[in-house]
Amino acid sequence: MFNTNSLRSCLYITILVFVMVVLMPAIDLLVCSKLKLNLMGGVSENKRAGTLLVIRKILIFLVFIVYLSGFLYITFFSRNASDEYQIHIALFKDLKDSIKIDFGVLGTLYYLLTGNIAEIGKHFEIVRFSGISQVYLNVMLFIPMGYLLPYMFKWFRQNIRLRTLAASFLLSLAVENMQLITKHGFYDLDDLFTNTLGGFLGGLLFTAFAFRVTYPNWKAELKRYRRWKKNAKKRTLYPFARSVETSRTVLLATDESQIWDFYVMKLGFRILRQLVPEDDPGTSFLLQLGSSQVEIRCSNKQEDLQKQYLAISVTKPEKVKKRLEENGIKAGSIEADPYTGVESFSFEAPDNVTVTILGQ
């Protein structure tokens, strides 16, 4: 993808990647600490935290835009269109032609396994630096891609390795096809492989640096996770953990009209099913909002019910709180959830139910 064999280019891009990987999260944490902003989804001490966190996201996105601009310039705008379509499908042929090893790959592996690395140097020769720099630069070009995607988007942080790998592969594939169509460069399988590798390494570097710096509790969380996983593999549901989710909560109620007024009209739940037994005055409702279901068993008679609880996860608790108050539902103040530290607040529902809203 790069049309250069300059050692200076390798040095420049290495410095830029180092600055982004190491200094960016350090500066991010320093500024957020000074401004008393909570980066872990919890309650911040700064009263303007909502606005400041949005500004932070915009600044990180601007860094990504600068990177993307440089990326597009290097891959398209710095080149002139050729007269013919150019395709290079011999995987790592240029790299093989750039390195000369007298005793071949098996001999190299032998000396590596026996620890005689000095012997390899005697039989190793760089014939052409351009092939090596090409591979190196193609890897380095995509490291910011794999690094910044999880930095910006929670979706990538939920599965950093797989999702950054897939995104890097698809973007590299799109670039190679555009270069082929516009005749601005080679359609090169080497580039597809090395770019994807660079994106994958960028995701690993995010975990190693940015995540650990901006999420200071990572070590304690990792320790608890490893302790759980050590024994969890023997447990019944562990193989199905990725597909398990809470789909239904059961509540008791006394008045059908309150269910309709509060859960349907005010909160926005949808009634999926209503069951009316023939010989029972009670009625059961199945309500749904997003992927959450609430089953309400209504007795249709006056009785005192014990305390009940319903927890709902949302992406923006502060906006939910504002909407509730607009609909006449008084909600408590936003505080840090004692278990996870995320933003949370509660409000009262009919039939002695306390609803807790948790941030995601």
Image (spheres, helix red, strand yellow):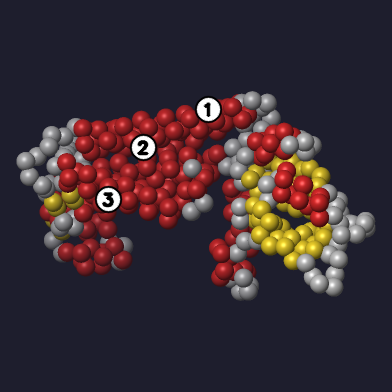
Asked whether disc 2 touches disc 3, contact meaning CB atoms under 8 Å apart, the reply is: no
Element at badge 2?
Answer: helix
Nearest the viewer among 18 and 343 is 343
**Taking 132 as reference, is 91 above or below it?**
below
The quarter holding residue 15 reads top left
Residue type, numbered disc 1 = Ile
Element at badge 3?
Answer: helix
Residue 5 in view in this figure: no
Of labels 3 and 1, earlier in sequence is 1
The residue at 77%/43% (across/down) is: 346
The quarter holding residue 273 reads bottom right
The residue at 18%/49% (across/down) is: 187
The residue at 15%/58% (across/down) is: 90
Residue type, numbered disc 3 = Leu
Q: Nearer the viewer, mark 1 or mark 2?
A: 1
Which label is found at residue 17?
2
Which residue is tagged 1?
55
Element at badge 1?
Answer: helix
Asked whether disc 3 touches disc 1, contact meaning CB atoms under 8 Å apart, the reply is: no
